[in-house]
Amino acid sequence: MKKALAALNIGYELEIGRGSFSGSELSLQLKVRLPGGHNPEQAMFELMCKRHGFDPAAKLHSAGFGNFTLESYHPRRPKYPWTVTLETGAQYKFTTEAVKDAFARLKS
C-alpha cells in the first residue's frame, strides 16, 4: 500500500496510519500533508534537540537496544519524552538521560 501511495506522486505527502479489517471492509487512516506546511511536532523535536545539544540525524548506540536514531519528542511524556527507532524498525520510548548517555558514548 505504501509503495502504491509513493508512486502516485501527486505533490502531497501521504501517510497511512492505523487500519482494521472486518469481514469485507478495510478501514485505514490516511494523512495528507501539504508540501512546505508547518509541522509543530517536527519543530518541537528540533527545538528540544537543540536545547539538549543533540544532533537529530546522529546514529546512536545503546548496550541494551543496539543502534538507533532519534525519531520524535513528546512533551506530554515527561519521564520518557524521546521516541527512538532501532535498526529493525521497532520504536521505543527513552528518557532524556538515556539519550544523553548515548550521545556521550558517541563522542568518546
Image: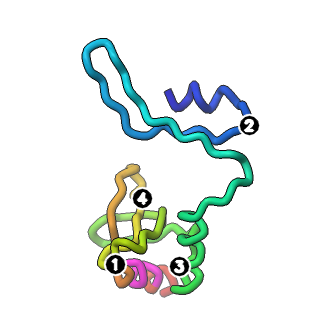
* Inter-mark Cα distance, 1 to 2: 36 Å
The answer to whether marks 3 and 2 mark residues whose Cβ atoms lie closer than 8 Å is: no
Q: Which mark is residue 78?
A: 1
- Which comes sooner in the sequence, label 1 or label 2? 2
The answer to whether marks 1 and 3 mark residues whose Cβ atoms lie closer than 8 Å is: no
Q: Which residue is mark 3?
A: 48
Q: Residue 18, located in which quarter of the rendered image? A: top left
Q: Is residue 81 left or right of residue 42?
A: left
Magenta residues span: 98-103
- Which comes sooner in the sequence, label 1 or label 4? 1
For badge 2, the amino acid type reads: Gly
Which residue: 26% across, 20% down? 22
* Inter-mark Cα distance, 4 to 3: 17 Å
Residue 43 percent coordinates (x, y)? 60, 69
* Inter-mark Cα distance, 1 to 4: 19 Å
Which residue: 54% across, 78% down? 49
- Which comes sooner in the sequence, label 4 or label 2? 2
* Inter-mark Cα distance, 1 to 3: 13 Å
Q: Residue 44, located in which quarter of the rendered image? A: bottom right
Colour mapping: rainbow
